[in-house]
Image (tube, helix red, strand yellow):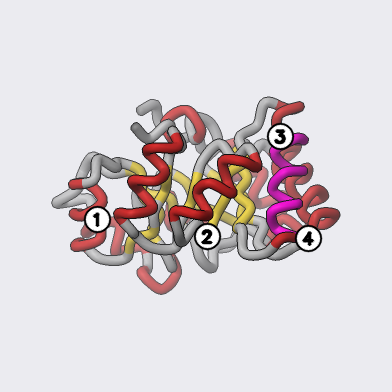
């Protein structure tokens, strides 16, 4: 039920634009798309975020890009995200009620996990794409160990990632690494572009 095999079939990076407002988010989303990052997430925590999500959904549709809604912490926010046109949902944690609401809405969901118990519960709910958060706190070795009991689960790493460490997480088996403010740093853009040039997510 994931849909993420299609959303993340190309670039091994995604962009998270948290609390940046409409204008700044449009600028950074455009940077991401032009760099080769296909998936952009807008965390929804305010009315301004909702406006940002709607605008990026509109612009993304013109480019054939998927825009998702993040920080979905309640079933009610699933409805908000769907109404805004989000293609997928991202959560900081794992809430079966939100997973169920996403399924009813027909939207793929990427819940946050940080322990083997989280991963096992998510798998029991039928999920095979998960968000590991906070990634830099978990460390790259977490992914090496977790692949043992859960070899089929695909992870998106978020939290504290930039051009200096995304390759380390990808080397550890992460399928997609998320960046945010790094897109505003000219010194990092070239390094991110190199990651995109030399790495591609393997075929599902």
Pointer 2 or 1: first along the chain: 2
First in sequence: mark 1 or mark 4? Answer: 4
Who comes first in sequence, dot 3 or dot 4? 4
Magenta-span inclusion, residue 128? no
In the rendered image, which residue does mark 4 sit on? 21
165 to 198, vertically: above or below: below
108 or 38: nearer the viewer: 108
Q: Which residues are magenta?
A: 48-59
Which residue position is annotated with label 2? 71
Q: Quick one: 169 or 118, which is closer to the camera? A: 118
Total marks placed: 4
Q: CA distance from mark 1 to mark 4?
A: 33 Å
Mark 4–mark 2 Cα distance, whole angstroms, equals: 16 Å
Magenta-drawn stretch, dominant element (helix, strand or loop): helix
Nearer the N terminus, badge 1 or badge 3? 3
Image quarter where the C terminus lies is top left
Residue at the far right in the pictured view: 23
Relative side of 123 to 71, left or right: left
Q: Is residue 185 visible?
A: no
Q: Secondary structure at mark 1?
A: helix
Q: x%, y% of residue 29?
A: 73, 46
Which comes before the other along the chain, label 4 or label 2? 4
SS for callout 2:
loop
Label 1 sits on residue: 119
Q: Nearer the viewer, mark 2 or mark 3?
A: 2
Whole-angstrom CA distance, mark 1 to mark 3, is 31 Å
Q: Residues within 10 Å of mark 3 (few under 14, many from 20)?
A: many
Circle 3 SS class: helix
């Amino acid at each position: 039920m994931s849909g993420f095999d299609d959303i993340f079939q190309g670039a091994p990076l995604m962009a998270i634009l948290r609390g940046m407002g409409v204008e700044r988010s449009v600028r950074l989303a455009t940077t991401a798309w032009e760099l080769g990052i296909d998936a952009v997430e807008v965390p929804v925590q305010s009315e301004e975020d909702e406006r940002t999500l709607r605008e990026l959904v509109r612009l993304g549709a013109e480019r054939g890009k998927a825009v998702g809604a993040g920080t979905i912490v309640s079933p009610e926010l699933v409805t908000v995200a769907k109404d805004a046109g989000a293609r997928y949902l991202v959560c900081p944690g794992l809430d079966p009620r939100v997973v169920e609401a996403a399924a009813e809405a027909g939207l793929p969901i990427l819940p946050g996990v940080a322990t083997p118990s989280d991963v096992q519960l998510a798998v029991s709910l039928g999920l095979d794409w998960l968000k590991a958060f906070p990634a830099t706190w978990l460390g790259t070795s977490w992914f090496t160990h977790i692949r043992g009991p859960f070899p089929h689960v695909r992870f998106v790493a978020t939290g504290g990632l930039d051009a200096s460490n995304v390759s380390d997480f990808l080397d550890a088996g992460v399928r997609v690494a998320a960046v945010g403010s790094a897109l505003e740093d000219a010194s990092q853009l070239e390094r991110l572009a190199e990651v995109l040039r030399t790495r591609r997510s393997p075929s599902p």
